[in-house]
Image: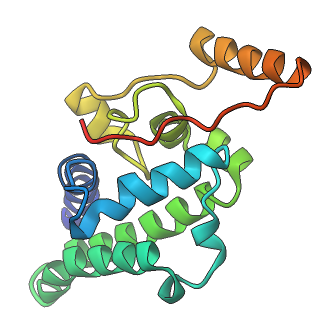
Amino acid sequence: MIGIPIGLMVSNLTEWWVHKHVLHDAKPDGFWNFHLYEHHANVLRNEGRDPAYEKPWWSSSPRRREVYGLVVMTLPFVALAPVAPFLAGTVVYCSVDYYRKHKRSHLDTAWAREQLPWHWDHHMGPDQHANWCVTRPWADRLRGTRRKYLGTEDEARMLARKERLKAAGLRVAPPPRPTAA
C-alpha cells in the first residue's frame, strides 16, 4: 500500500516537471509547442476556456498530443503492476484524473477558479511561467513555484482595468501571445 502515496507524489512531481521543462520549454517548431502557442493562446483569448476541449480528443491535434503524452508517461508504470500494483494503479488514476481535471478546467471556468485556483493562476495570472501543477499544487509548493493571483490586488486591478476599457467603449485587446521563458 506504500505504492499509493509514492504514486501520488511521483505523478505530481512528473506533472510539474513535464509542464515546466517539456511543454513550456518547447521549441516553436517542436512537437510539444501546441501547449504554449495554441493552448495558452486560446485560454488567454477566451478568459480561461479552450474551445479545443469542446471536440473529441482525437479530432484535435493539441488534445491528441496531450493524451499521447499521458499514455506514454503512464505505460512504464502499468508494466510494474505485477510487482507494484498499488503504485501502478495510483499512477493510472493520476493520469486519468489529470486529463479529466484539465479538460473540465477549460470548459467550466467557474469550477476551475473554485477547485483549481493554482491552475487558473498559471493561465490567467501575470506569470505564466509559475504554477506548473494542474491536479494538486504539492510540487509547486515544494519547489517554490506557487504564485497566487486569484483574489489578490493584482487580479482586482486587472479586472478593474478591463471594466474601465469596456465602459469607455474600447475593445479589450487580447493579451500578447505567450513566449517561452
Check the picture and name the quadrant holding the C terminus: top left
At 47% from the left and 50% from the top, the residue drawn is: 40
**Residue at 43% across, 79% down:** 61
Q: Residue at x 66, y 11 (%)?
A: 157
Residue 146's spot in the image, x, y percent? Answer: 36, 28
Quadrant assignment, res 63: bottom left
- The vertical placement of 64 against 119, above or below, is below
* Between 66 and 8, the one nearer to me in the picture: 66
Q: Answer left or right for 4 relative to 111.
A: left
- Image height check: is 80 above or below 126? below
Point out the image quarter for the N terminus.
bottom left
Q: Nearer the viewer, residue 50 or 141?
A: 50
Q: Is residue 170 above or below residue 123?
A: above
Residue 141 placed where, x, y %?
A: 30, 30
- Residue 151 at x, y percent in the picture: 64, 20
User: For the point 62% across and 19% down, which residue is it?
Assistant: 155
Instruction: Answer with left or right where residue 178 lies relative to residue 46.
Output: left
Percent from the top left, x then y, of residue 121?
50, 33
Report how many numbered discs are placed on residues in the image. Answer: 0
